[in-house]
Amino acid sequence: MSNLSVVELPVVEGEVVPCCPPVTSAALSEADSVRMAAMFKALSDPVRLRLFSRVASHEGGEACVCDIQDVGVSQPTVSHHLKKLREAGLLSSQRRGTWVYYRVEPSVLAAMAGLLVGSR
């Protein structure tokens, strides 16, 4: 018999507000530049970028580590990269039984896109 249960995840409603203003609107503050540099630094590794992409594009907006770990590196290396993505604020995680499920933080994509593109 399985110990797994279904857990309802919260849905973010309303407008998602980016963390930082677009680079075209004004010079970034020191705090905003540090925050965004950490995000982009975490994504500068090809394996991390692939893992982030797999989570972001996974059906339902979340992915079990068991579904995304085939990126050409060992399991401990996958865990290391996912930890770096969590520490940078790009992913959140939730343990369910023996598996960990990952989600892209709701404001992350909007923040990165808004920073680079701005309003047109």
Image (cartoon, rainbow, N blue to C red):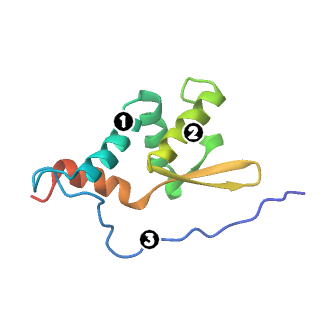
Which residue is labeled 2 in the image? 68
Q: Residue at x 49, y 38 (%)?
A: 51
Q: CA distance from mark 2 to mark 3?
A: 24 Å
The numbered mark, 2 or 3, whose residue comes first in the sequence reads 3
Of badges 2 and 3, the one in the foreground is: 3
Which residue is labeled 3 in the image? 12
The numbered mark, 2 or 1, whose residue comes first in the sequence reads 1
Residue 42: give x, y in percent of width and height.
Answer: 41, 37
The numbered mark, 3 or 1, whose residue comes first in the sequence reads 3
Q: CA distance from mark 3 to mark 1?
A: 26 Å
Of badges 3 and 1, the one in the foreground is: 1
Q: Residue at x 68, y 54 (%)?
A: 95
Of badges 2 and 1, the one in the foreground is: 1
6 horizontally vs 116: left or right: right
Q: Quadrant of residue 88?
A: top left
Q: Quadrant of the N terminus?
A: bottom right
The kind of secondary structure element at disc 3 is: loop
Does the CB distance between marks 3 and 1 fall below 8 Å?
A: no
Does the CB distance between marks 2 and 3 fall below 8 Å?
A: no
Q: Residue at x 44, y 49 (%)?
A: 90
Q: Amino acid at mark 1?
A: Lys
Could you classify mark 2 by the number of other residues whose Cα lies within 10 Å: few (under 14), some (14-19), or many (20 or more)? some
Residue 21: give x, y in percent of width and height.
Answer: 20, 58
The kind of secondary structure element at disc 1 is: helix
The kind of secondary structure element at disc 2 is: helix
Could you classify mark 1 by the number of other residues whose Cα lies within 10 Å: few (under 14), some (14-19), or many (20 or more)? few
Q: Amino acid at mark 2?
A: Ile
**Residue 41, labelled with which disc?**
1
Residue 117: give x, y in percent of width and height.
Answer: 17, 50
38 horizontally vs 61: left or right: left
- 95, above or below 47, in the image: below
